[in-house]
Amino acid sequence: MQPSASGFRAFVVLWTGQFVSLVASAVTSFALGVYCYLQSDSVTTLAVLYALPFVPFLIVSPVAGPLVDRWGARRAMLVSNGGCMLIALLMTVLLWTDTFAVWQVYFIVLVTASLRALDLPAFEAALPLLVPQEQLGRATGLRMLATGVSAVVGPLLAGALLLAVEIEGIVALDCASFLLAIVTLALVRIPRLPLQETATGGVRASVLQDAREGFRYLQVRPGLLSLAVLLGVMSFGVGFGELVLPPLVLAFGAPGDLGLVMSVGALGMVVVSGVISVWTWPRPRQRVGGLVASLFVFAASIVLASLRPSVPLLTVAVFLFMGSATLIVGIVQTVWQVKVEPRMLGRTVALRNAIALTPQLVGNLLAGVVCEYVAVPLVGAERVRSDLVALLVGEGAGRGYALALTVLGVVTALGVALVVRSPRLRRLDEELPDVPVREWDDAGAATSR
């Protein structure tokens, strides 16, 4: 068997189950946050619920990647979706029997995030085994479209369903969505590669040895490491920006204005994902150029958001911010899939995700400290003290947040400029050609063609 049109149809079947599950999980996550806040009346509880998934994801990812390569993408996704279904079923029982307590959510979030650390590299590793190489960009676009739509639809559905079926019904629907994902996995055959071989032809001794091999694989391919670092630069901007944006808008606007800005930003994800899913992807040499251009648009959008206290200006900036971030992730994922041997995808994707997610967590933590203790006191909470700062970010309340965004945009652009100077990145296609298109038989054996 080789990736073909029928393979793309199989991917669509698999994607459908994952899409429904993503939307249901987005609904559950939003509704559960609202429910726990109402039960505890604590903003700290809400903050912990948002930050907690980062920790197990970062810890588990280096081990999850080798497991994907050992088990195969299909089995790893079955374990992940099956585990999430059991967790959702347990929570449904706790809610229906009135034995649910807010502290139990911490355990649920930890386990679910750990299982997600297994699912994400497994899904990405499955794509080159199902989809023709020239269709990988479109498949990646569909994946990201599912993420964008879930971000837009999740909160809207959660509000309606909390009134219609309450939290118990929402969690039960989430459980059913995982069952649908498992059914679609059962309908799709994903070739399984031989388990006994490593990238160097040796016999695998342990999961930790597999993880070390993943590190070594990236070490000798610095172009891929540069891609991961660029993704990390973007992720830091996302982590910092998403924390600064709400107080920035609310300093001069109403909650409805914030909702409008965030909705249009999520729409930017959807629009760009839709374009990617039908795009005729550029030639290899154009991929890195498109990535760098997208990163500079990303940095420029951060600065644009800080220029003046204007809802229309912020709306345009956040649309560009989320849209360019989506395009960056799409390009990196597609390049990764065509440059990395399928047997190494699970490990290297998990490592790349950990490299990219760590700066986002740092950005989340740093944003509050920088704004509360540096930027806002320096600029002034209600009025801008400096004529130079007023010239840069405008007059009014909360312009300290705007100054923080200005600095973030400049730092992001400088970080991108520094990384793209790497000759390994510029020569990525010469030094690391695309993986040859393979034919896969039922046993997972491969031959080039």
Image: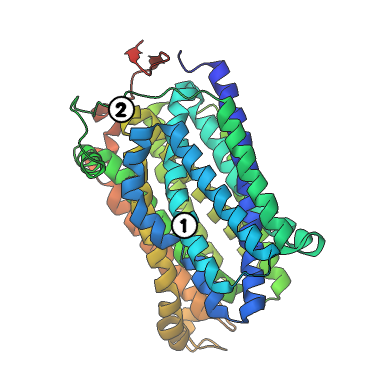
- The image quadrant where one finds the C terminus is top left
Residue 19 coordinates in the image, percent (x, y): 62, 41
Res. 195 mark: 2
Mark 1 touches mark 2? (CB < 8 Å):
no
Q: What is the secondary structure assignment of the residue under circle 2?
A: loop
Tell me where residue 374 sits by quadrant. Answer: bottom left
| Amino acid residing under circle 2 | Leu
Q: Residue at x 68, y 76 (%)?
A: 253
Q: Is residue 266 visible?
A: no
User: Relative to residue 378, is residue 170 drawn left or right?
Assistant: right
Residue 446 coordinates in the image, percent (x, y): 34, 15
Residue 409 coordinates in the image, percent (x, y): 43, 63
- Categorize mark 1 by other alpha carbons within 10 Å: few (<14), some (14-19), many (20+): some
Residue that carries the numbered disc 1 in the rendered image: 111
Res. 235 mark: none
Say which of 383 and 146 sits in front: 146
Q: Residue at x 23, y 45 (%)?
A: 208
The residue lying furthest to the top in this view is 449
Q: How many marks?
A: 2
Q: Residue at x 47, y 37 (%)?
A: 123
Q: Is residue 161 visible?
A: yes
Q: Residue at x 38, y 19 (%)?
A: 444
Say which of 144 and 267 sits in front: 144
| Amino acid residing under circle 1 | Val
Tell me where residue 219 sits by quadrant. Answer: top left
C-alpha separation, residue under disc 1 versus residue under disc 2: 26 Å
Query: Please, is residue 426 above or below residue 298 in the view?
Result: above
